[in-house]
Image (cartoon, rainbow, N blue to C red):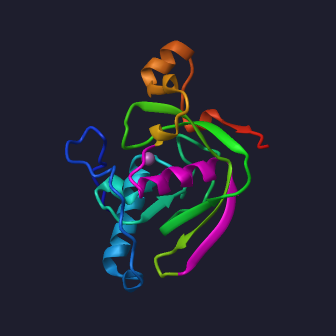
Amino acid sequence: MTICNIHTTKDKAHKLCQASTVILEKDFNSIWLKDLANNLRDTMNQSKATGIAAPQIGVNRCVIAFGGRPSLNFPEFDEPFTILINPSYEILGKTQAQVWEHCLSMPGKRGYTLRANRIRYQGYDLGGQKISAETSGILAVLLQHEIDHLQGILFNEHVKNKTEFGDIAYFEQVLGKRHHIEDGLKVLAGE
Ligand code: NI
């Protein structure tokens, strides 16, 4: 088991704002790619997170991981553990979702973001088999968050109202509630 150091925006030399490079066909099934996947799984589980992207452990390659076991932060999130390589998504419909997001790479911060509520995502498993599915709600938001990491984009860029991004301690003081993703997702009807 390998628990990696999670890179945060507080680290001087972090590469969280850089775009990641894609995994080439010849690298599917390779030992280093499997090692990277295992490191993502172990580090995500250790952090009790629901998702993680390779740049967060200092590897600027297009690999994300999510799901796996009931999350302590979000017990209703019940997705099988998935490694998604070279992931992408397209937005389906105009319905949007608002949710309090957080990120291992921005510890202590929360932000109320606006995202697409429904997407079709695709990518590949470790063996190069294509994965493609439609999803909505929390998983759709989570995938947009993780795939953003591969473009060097952090969730604060999706916060519409600047007063709704800041320290968790501040929100707890002012609003008197926890601000985690499990606080619920508000779906805004599309046109
Ligand atoms: Ni994140």
Is 162 situated above or below 181? above
Verify whether residue 142 appears in magenta.
yes
Residue at (57% x, 21% y) in the render: 177
Q: Which residues are magenta?
A: 129-154
Q: Nearer the viewer, residue 4 or 153?
A: 153
Which quarter of the figure is the C terminus placed in? top right
Is 110 situated above or below 12? above
Q: Position of residue 37 (x, y in %)?
A: 40, 67
Residue at (65% x, 35% y) in the render: 184
Name the side, left or right, on which 163 lies relative to 13.
Answer: right
Residue 77 visible: no
Residue 97 visible: yes
Which quarter of the figure is the N terminus placed in? bottom left
Furthest residue to the top?
Answer: 174
Is 157 situated above or below 58? above
Residue at (54% x, 81% y) in the render: 129
Verify whether residue 16 appears in magenta.
no
Name the side, left or right, on which 45 lies relative to 56.
Answer: right
Q: Position of residue 11 (x, y in %)?
A: 23, 42
Residue at (69% x, 63% y) in the render: 134
Is 132 situated above or below 103? below
Q: Position of residue 35 (x, y in %)?
A: 33, 71
Furthest residue to the front?
Answer: 191
Q: Position of residue 97 (x, y in %)?
A: 66, 41
